[in-house]
Image: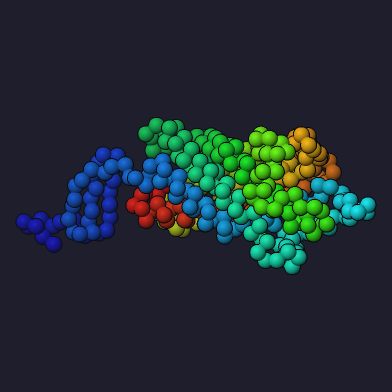
Amino acid sequence: MVNNGKPTAPAAATEAVTGDDTMQQTAATGRTEMRPVKYHYADTFWCTYLVSVFAASIAETVTYPLDLTKTRLQIQGEAAAVDIDGGVKKLKYRGMFATATGIIREEGALKLWQGITPALYRHLVYSGVRIVTYDALRKKLRNGKETFSLWQSALSGVGAGALAQWLASPADLVKVHVQMEGKRRLLGLEPRVHSAAHAFREIISRGGIFGLWKGSVPNVQRAALVNLGDLTTYDTVKHFIMHKTGLPDCHVVHIMSSICAGLVAATMGTPADVVKTRIMNQPTDASGRGLLYKGSVDCLQQTIGKEGFFALYKGFLPVWIRMAPWSLTFWLSFEQIRASLGAGGY
């Protein structure tokens, strides 16, 4: 195309953004439109929060059976035997697939989603808070700069994960109690809770309002490590791949980044997850104090002393297998929803 004897720019579907208040060049229509670029509503606090919760709910529903399997595996071996009617019933160890098929055979396929309600309640707080907190810390530490060092990303991930998990710890505690009820019934034990609401009331009646934060210390430690692996790895690997390969912000980059994030998060978070699960699941006395462990350090020592170091990685395979698709589903959903709203890449 020629305009007054001079060739115009080709009509390629590209868009250039050079700053917060700069101009956009849109060539899809064969012309250049100059207009100010404002802060997109999809980048606002509440929109980011809601998109995070929605994406996390999708990922949680898809991968929840692996979470239930992981929890059952981590409880195995914490007691040498269970006393039933004056006798002693030895606990039978199972692997991941045997545990999952055992749940289906002994309790029914739908029991693989037992405890999904409090798990979704948890993400109303956890996923929303962790993403918006990480985003806020990232912007604060960047201070307008393009570069974001690894230690800054790590600090943001740890801080965001710890805060989000502390706030969401009550929902996590309720989820663990509900998840274990099917196994208790099979062992002939009296059920402790009948629903998420009943579990919530029972925890408060036994330990008061602070009883909802039982196991919160290892829970927060785990979340800090998991988000150090997930948020930091995803953010760092994504921008590293884009910088080194020249690939655009696309699904291929999202997939590679989320797989790396899931592996690192599972490796770093599984030991703390085992301790957290055991402390949350242990029976309590009338005052709400644990009958098996005095705290996270005592649980760690007992687990290693009685079962060996690798007991801390009990359930690692389902944790990893779950975190990889969870991270993949979450980040793909999160990025896709943001793109559909017109926002840029995260």
Q: Residue furthest right?
A: 86
Which of 307 and 202 lies nearest the eye of the viewer?
A: 202
The number of callouts visible is: 0
Q: Is residue 259 above or below residue 296?
A: below
Which of 191 and 16 lies nearest the eye of the viewer?
A: 191
Image coordinates for residue 185, horizontal then vertical, percent: 78, 57
Left or right of residue 268: residue 36: left
Which of 132 and 107 lies nearest the eye of the viewer?
A: 107
Where the N terminus falls, by quadrant?
bottom left
Q: Measuring 78% from the left and 43% from the top, which residue is drawn there?
A: 283
Q: Residue furthest left?
A: 4
**Quadrant of the rendered image containing residue 221:** top right
Tell me if residue 316 can be seen.
no
Tell me if residue 177 can be seen.
yes
Q: Measuring 40% from the left and 49% from the top, which residue is drawn there?
A: 345
Q: Measuring 72% from the left and 59% from the top, which residue is drawn there?
A: 96
Left or right of residue 27: residue 331: right
